[in-house]
Image: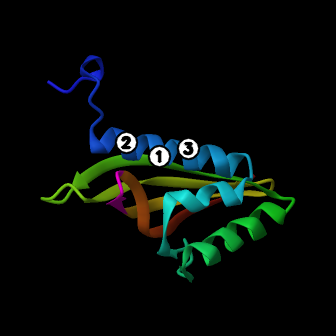
Amino acid sequence: MDGPSSGMTTPQDAIRARRRMTNKFIAAHQAARLRPFMTPDAHLTGGEGGLLIGAEAIIAAFEAQFADPDFITYERRSGEITLDQEGLRAAERGAWTGRWRDQTLGGDYLAVWRKVTGQWVIEQELYVTLTREAA
């Protein structure tokens, strides 16, 4: 049994912990601290369908969001995490919420994680906006 007492961390637990860290850095508006969580060639498709290619473009997009005085945070909540046969790639499905002073957006996401030199990093993320509410 690989429970908390055995000292073994499952890949799913590791990915969830990494996701919680990215949520924390986004809430703190620390865009540069997100860089180690993604591959250099990462792809992110935003909730409205726009495509960002490369960690630098993704970091720049976060910096622009953080410069918006109405932006508060994005939070991603991990749901199911499925591993490939080799245990080197994983699909994380979850729900996301984006908060601004005047509105809240939300929806579903799918993230592809890859294990690189012992650490899980994001290769691709796809966000779909499904809800929009005025604050």
Gap in Å between the C-alphas at discs 2 and 1? 6 Å
Task: Note whether residue 134 is visible.
Answer: no
Gap in Å between the C-alphas at discs 3 and 1? 5 Å
| Vertical side of 54 occupied by 81: above or below | above
Whether residue 6 sits left or right of residue 121 in the image: it is left
Whether residue 65 sits left or right of residue 81 in the image: it is right
Picture quadrant of residue 111 = bottom left
Which residue, given by chain and number where applicable, does mark 1 sit on?
18
Identity, as a three-letter code, of the amino acid under mark 1: Arg
Gap in Å between the C-alphas at discs 2 and 3? 11 Å
| Vertical side of 44 occupied by 114: above or below | above
Whether residue 39 sits left or right of residue 8 in the image: it is right
Q: What x and y, as percent, mark residue 86?
A: 15, 59
Q: What x and y, as percent, mark residue 92?
A: 34, 56
Whether residue 29 sits left or right of residue 43 in the image: it is right
Cβ atoms at labels 2 and 1 below 8 Å apart: yes
Which residue, given by chain and number where applicable, does mark 3 sit on?
21
- Residue at 66% over, 52% down: 26
Is label 1 in a helix, a strand or a loop? helix
| Vertical side of 115 occupied by 19: above or below | above
Identity, as a three-letter code, of the amino acid under mark 2: Ala
Picture quadrant of residue 84 = bottom left
Identity, as a three-letter code, of the amino acid under mark 3: Met
- Residue at 54% over, 78% down: 54
Q: Is residue 88 magenta?
A: no
Is label 2 in a helix, a strand or a loop? helix
Bounds of the magenta span? 113-118
Q: What x and y, as percent, mark residue 101?
A: 80, 53
The N terminus, quarter of image: top left
Exactly how many numbered labels are in the figure? 3
- Residue at 30% over, 34% down: 9
